[in-house]
Image (spheres, grey):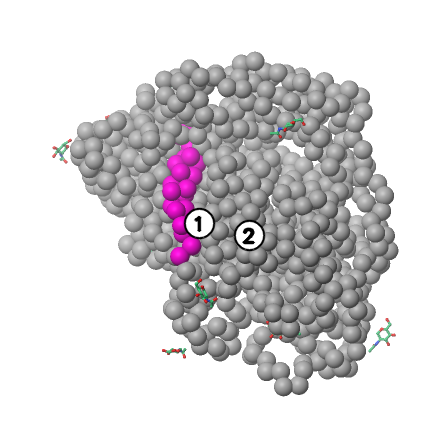
Amino acid sequence: MRISLAALISLAALGSAQKATFEPSFPSPWGTGGPGWDEAYEKAREFVSKLTLLEKVNLTTGTGNQADLCTGNTGSVPRLNFRHLCLQDGPVGVRYTDKNSVFPAGISAAATWSRSLLQKRGEAIGQEFSGKGIDVHLGPVVGPLGRDPAGGRNFEAFGPDPYLAGVAVAETIIGQQNAGVIASVKHYILNEQEHFRSGISTNIDDRTMHEVYLWPFADAVRAGVGSVMCSYNQINNTYGCENSYVLNKLLKNELGFQGFVVTDWGAHHSGVVSALAGLDMSMPGEGLGAGKYGSYWGGALTEAVLSGAVPQWRLDDMAIRIMAAFYKVGRDKKQVDINYSSWTYETTGYRYWAAKQGNTTVNYHVDVQADHGELIREIGAKATVLLKNVGKALPLVKPESIAVIGEDAQDNPDGPNGCVDRICNNGTLAMGWGSATAEYPYLISPATALEKQAEADGTVFTNVKGNFDLDAAKAAASNASVAIVFANANSGEGYTTLDGNFGDRNNLTLWKGGDELIEAVSSVNPNTVVVIHSVGPVLIDHIKTNPNVTAIVWAGLPAQESGNSLTDVLYGKVNPQGRTPFTWGKGAKDWGVTTLINSTSFEPQQDFAEGPFIDYRYFDREEIEPSFEFGFGLSYTNFTYSNLSAVLHDPGVYKPAYGTTPPAPTYGELDLDPKNAVTPEGFSKIPKFIYPYINSANISNTTEVIPPGGRNASAQPILPAGGPSGGNPDLYKVLYIISADITNSGDVAGTEIPQLYISHGGPADPKVVLRGFDEILLEPGETKTVVFNVTYRDLSNWNSEVEDWRLTGYPKTAYVGASSRDLRLQKPLPLPRA
Ligand SMILES: *[C@@H]1O[C@H](CO)[C@@H](O)[C@H](O)[C@H]1NC(C)=O
Ligand SMILES: *[C@@H]1O[C@H](CO)[C@@H](O)[C@H](O)[C@H]1NC(C)=O
Ligand SMILES: *[C@@H]1O[C@H](CO)[C@@H](O)[C@H](O)[C@H]1NC(C)=O
Ligand SMILES: *[C@@H]1O[C@H](CO)[C@@H](O)[C@H](O)[C@H]1NC(C)=O
Ligand SMILES: *[C@@H]1O[C@H](CO)[C@@H](O)[C@H](O)[C@H]1NC(C)=O
Ligand SMILES: *[C@@H]1O[C@H](CO)[C@@H](O)[C@H](O)[C@H]1NC(C)=O
Ligand SMILES: *[C@@H]1O[C@H](CO)[C@@H](O)[C@H](O)[C@H]1NC(C)=O
Ligand SMILES: *[C@@H]1O[C@H](CO)[C@@H](O)[C@H](O)[C@H]1NC(C)=O
Ligand SMILES: *[C@@H]1O[C@H](CO)[C@@H](O)[C@H](O)[C@H]1NC(C)=O
Ligand SMILES: *[C@@H]1O[C@H](CO)[C@@H](O)[C@H](O)[C@H]1NC(C)=O
Ligand SMILES: *[C@@H]1O[C@H](CO)[C@@H](O)[C@H](O)[C@H]1NC(C)=O
Ligand SMILES: *[C@@H]1O[C@H](CO)[C@@H](O)[C@H](O)[C@H]1NC(C)=O
């Protein structure tokens, strides 16, 4: 690594300053099973007990980048006929293959506020991964959460509210794992921006960690997620994949996570230290600067076990956790052969891509799409948020003429997959760029779908394909009964830049002259409908207040059925139920955070000094009026709210967890004779493969500093907030049952998303936080009752002194309304003294 002079100077300066740290937490908690895991643990114990040292190590280490068919490939256990595990990107569908579907991005899925659609989406994604022979799906995403509206990968996740993200991630995981694939929730944790992602230290206090960023991961663990991917960044100056505070303490002890932790690709920085800090799998296997094995694990881990630096129980625990996840989702019954290669679309090619060996049939082009296109169309439509609608501009009813204007409505002339990893913004935007991409089977552009609708209606249709010929745009717009103008804003993963944006967005405005185009169109047409495809909020207050703009529609990142989903909404076949999963500010400074982009250090320090006040919590505290607040969205009908009731269900006596774990178990006797760990005679190695074998029977001791307590196998205290799969079960006890009546007071059927917000009442608390929502379909005139269960966790704050959740003495209030600022009903929630 080359170090610039400026970097050296700033490092020296930092050396003297006080750096954020944390209290180390050792030993790494060993998996014990528990609810939802016991049967899987039984099977895992039986399997792992049969394994040798080398076979166990094989399960923990990738065989190298592009070594085998999948994005990630572990070693195998040929003796027991156990093929290697296949790990594959990404969150919107199977990456690097064909005959797959592309699903709406996380941010759009969240915008439906529909538990059932989130779960169906998860299940359909899971089926496609399973059908290709994949064992581990690298998703879903709740890190980044979305602290910074410009964050490049926010669109992969479910928006900056931890509660909404928590529900969304849990439903996704349940769906995916029901389909027989292990979900790997990522990126754990605080990977909130792309700039400096491999060195930045995010410094955060324990309360914010628990109440905001850890929250959705807790829901993921409670949903039984099989795997967690640790992130590139540092947390309080230690890398995510060797951070004993986030892995050992929070994830494995407090949240009681029973599955395995896998590194993000290349996020592995140490051998012994990461093993003792709670890492279970290294991907893709090799490690930068890792020394003689080219990997921090593989042979290096074998050597560490042989020398005693890593105890057997820790290696066994890694293997148990990996295999328990495997059995939990039923892969032993559902596994099919891997049917594709990530590294070529040709039918034949090298199986061992990096080695250029094993020319054979690698792509069987197995069609896994089933009828998922219909679900994708439905999610795309139900995720569409109607932000403005004046004088019943929408829905459209057989308009005389429509003009579709803007590149964002069009097909990409190079085809929907014209740019590798979607690193371009050509044609309509329907996914961001980076590793969270998949190849489109097709992409229905808005222009295509709208033209078809116009034909059916006898509507005169004109289409202006570019953004920059404003005269052509005006000519078309001025003569149309409705002008539909499109614009977008993109972002992606920071391994590359697009138009100068290094993953993170440089600004929050529309791309490619979108504002000028909208201005031109609306200057000549008093019935202008604006459609925005974007990865997150854009600054559109001038569009909101423009009297000629009669409607604004946020269509998110809808994927392959984009045009059909949009047409369903514009023409009223689907009455919009989408609600914005983030706040739309009026200016870039409104969120109170900035992307850290200028640093000469390769370990820049970023303090999350705003604490829990991100997105609407910040706008509320600072009394900043947004263009559109979190949770907002219109319908083609109206809803009224009445009869709020709050019934104390349980007095809320919370029992902190206590007691100790059993001592660390081991499974089977290890042969610790180094002579038996060298490459067996006659074994033919595939070039560039990472193997578990050691180079020579002369093993050496690790040069890493072994953390105190790291090898301690004795029984350990259970944390007060701790418990199997999600923490202390008392956290999920229902304290209050809240209900309200919702009535459709308009004249068409529609779905309302009633939202429950809670005020925790303290001076350091946000004004309100989301703690419940539901989707309620109502015919005109119909009334239904929505019911919210409010748990002890929902009403509590994290108390860093007792390291547990506590109900504070401040008065709690429940609000039920249609958005974070449209709080129509309220009631105090008195709590008996604990
Ligand atoms: C991380 O560092 C911050 C800033 O110095 C500090 O407030 C916080 O307590 C640290 N977190 C932990 C878990 O120690
Ligand atoms: C480890 O995995 C590799 C790659 O799958 C395989 O070739 C090798 O035989 C395995 N080693 C052992 C000891 O099972
Ligand atoms: C892929 O699947 C097809 C059809 O299910 C099967 O015939 C074939 O053997 C599989 N190929 C590989 C390499 O797993
Ligand atoms: C792989 O084998 C096929 C025939 O089976 C051949 O056409 C192709 O050229 C080979 N590819 C390489 C890279 O050797
Ligand atoms: C697509 O995008 C790339 C990169 O931004 C650009 O260079 C290229 O000209 C575009 N192609 C078309 C057909 O617009
Ligand atoms: C304007 O629209 C009408 C139909 O609505 C069409 O007959 C006429 O040709 C259009 N004029 C121009 C200049 O495009
Ligand atoms: C914001 O960034 C986009 C994409 O790079 C660019 O097209 C646009 O012109 C920028 N906006 C401003 C105001 O600079
Ligand atoms: C609205 O459109 C009309 C043309 O119908 C135009 O005269 C007027 O200037 C426009 N207003 C704005 C604010 O652009
Ligand atoms: C970052 O540095 C560049 C070049 O020195 C400068 O133009 C820019 O204003 C800086 N940005 C911020 C946010 O400080
Ligand atoms: C909803 O109610 C508002 C205010 O009463 C009214 O202006 C609007 O027309 C109604 N919208 C629908 C779709 O019924
Ligand atoms: C490794 O360390 C142990 C003590 O921890 C010591 O007994 C042994 O001699 C060391 N081995 C080598 C090769 O340095
Ligand atoms: C709400 O809580 C009650 C009481 O614990 C329980 O019976 C009911 O099933 C819960 N409903 C949901 C949707 O969790």
Instruction: Report if residue 604 is visible in the image.
Output: no
**Relative side of 150 to 299, left or right:** left
Q: Nearest the camera: 153 or 173? A: 173
Query: Does residue 681 lie above or below 140 as drawn?
Result: below
Structural distance between the alpha carbons of marks 2 and 1: 27 Å
Q: Quadrant of the N terminus?
A: bottom right
Q: Which residues are magenta?
A: 367-387
Q: Quadrant of the C terminus?
A: top right
SS for callout 2: loop
Q: Amino acid at mark 2?
A: Gly
The residue furthest bottom is 682
Q: Quadrant of residue 77?
A: bottom right
Q: Nearest the camera: 783 or 3? A: 783
Q: Nearest the camera: 514 or 794? A: 794
Q: Is residue 371 magenta?
A: yes
**Residue at position x 50%, y 67% in the image:** 69
Q: Position of residue 629 (x, y in %)?
A: 50, 29
SS for callout 1: loop
| Residue linked to disc 1 | 432
Q: Position of residue 438 (x, y in %)?
A: 43, 55
**Relative side of 173 to 339, left or right:** right
Marking on residue 180? 2
Marking on residue 44? none
Q: Position of residue 671 (x, y in %)?
A: 78, 74
Q: Position of residue 803 (x, y in %)?
A: 79, 39
**Residue at position x 32%, y 41% in the image:** 563
**Residue at position x 60%, y 52% in the image:** 329
Q: Amino acid at mark 1?
A: Gly
**Residue at position x 21%, y 35% in the image:** 456
Counting other residues with Cα less than 10 Å from the Cα at mark 1, is it few (<14), some (14-19), or many (20 or more)? many
